[in-house]
Image (cartoon, helix red, strand yellow):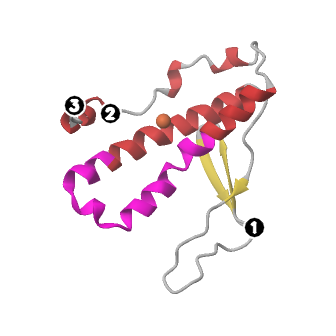
Amino acid sequence: MAEFDLDAYVGRSKALDLFAFPWDDVSHHPVSAEAVRTLRYMQDIESHTIIYLRELLATRAVDDPEVATFLACWLYEETFHGIALARFLEAAGSPVGPREQPAARIPGSSGSRPRGCRSSPRHGRTSARCT
Ligand SMILES: [Fe+2]
């Protein structure tokens, strides 16, 4: 099994260039319902990397400087993948829309977030709204 080259990964890690995509052209190409469903799933996974990271930050894994370095780059890259997929879906006429937020972790609490908090990725920005 090949060894992971952290220095090489860090050296080439970067955000996806959201200006490199012809977003205005997306609407000229129909996207099937099955493709939209798949892209929404992928967008969900990519944009929830921070949730996975939160879980990992609660472990001793981050005591390893190489792991911590990898996680920082991983979050940076995956966040932009999620933004790009959200932007594509919106350009295709199937915006992601609001979704439930995962439960907040408050020491001593049951871990639930106040009811009514949702977020919505739009135009490359994610906004949170609590009612
Ligand atoms: Fe990704």
First-in-chain label (1 vs 2): 2
Most common SS among magenta residues? helix
Q: Residues within 10 Å of mark 2 (few under 14, many from 20)?
A: some
Image quarter in which the C terminus is found: bottom right
**Could you tell me which residue is drawn at 21 percent across and 58 percent down?**
64
Circle 1 residue = 116
Q: Residue 8's mark? A: 3
Circle 2 residue = 13
Closest to the camera, between mark 3 and mark 2, is: 3
Q: Secondary structure at mark 1?
A: loop
First-in-chain label (3 vs 2): 3
* The CB of the residue at mark 1 lies under 8 Å from ligand 1: no
Residue 130 location (% of width, % of height): 71, 66
Q: Give, as a three-letter code, the residue at label 1.
A: Gly
Magenta highlight on residue 9: no
First-in-chain label (3 vs 1): 3
Query: Which residue range is magenta in the image?
Result: 43-70
